[in-house]
């Protein structure tokens, strides 16, 4: 079953290749959505995929897909609309 979540990721997540490494993980797992830097220094991710695969993706984000990054806080919000995206894109 397809699920959609919004992830707000805090820590050292900008200027370390975090968005591009997140895209690589998403593409490998078949996750759709977006990843974008935010003005407050965080990164916002919209992720859509099968429940088990989505959990794998969230685990990879928590561990920081970028070796230079470090996640200190992750806020996860369930989204109702799973038809938001057709692929995974870096935006912003």
Image (spheres, rainbow, N blue to C red):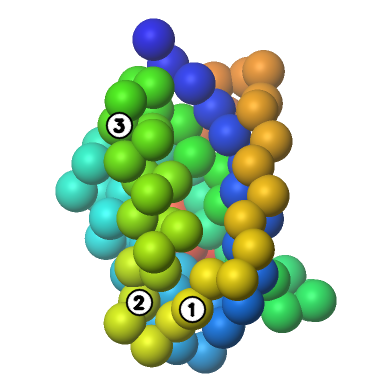
Which part of the image, by quadrant, shows the N terminus? top left
> Secondary structure under badge 3?
helix
**Farthest top residue in view:** 1
Q: Which residue is mark 2?
A: 66
Q: Is residue 46 visible?
A: yes
Label 3 neighbour load within 10 Å: few <14, some 14-19, many 20+: some
- Residue 42 locus on image (x, y percent): 68, 71
- Residue 25 locus on image (x, y percent): 28, 55
Q: Quadrant of residue 8?
A: bottom right
Choose the circle earlier in sequence order: 3 or 2: 3
Instruction: Identify the residue at horizontal 68%, vertical 49% (top origin).
Output: 75
Disc 3 to disc 2, C-alpha distance: 19 Å
Q: 76 and 25: which one is in front?
A: 76
The numbered disc on residue 60 is none
Q: Which residue is mark 1?
A: 70
> Secondary structure under badge 2?
loop
Which part of the image, by quadrant, shows the C terminus? bottom right
């Amino acid at each position: 079953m397809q699920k959609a979540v919004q992830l707000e990721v805090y820590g050292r997540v900008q200027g370390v290749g975090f968005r591009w490494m997140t895209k690589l993980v998403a593409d490998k797992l078949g996750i759709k959505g977006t990843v974008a830097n935010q003005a407050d220094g965080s990164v916002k991710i919209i992720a859509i995929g099968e429940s088990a695969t989505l959990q794998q993706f969230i685990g990879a984000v928590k561990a920081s897909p970028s070796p230079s990054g470090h996640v200190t806080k992750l806020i996860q919000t369930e989204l109702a609309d799973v038809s938001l995206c057709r692929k995974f894109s870096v935006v912003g």
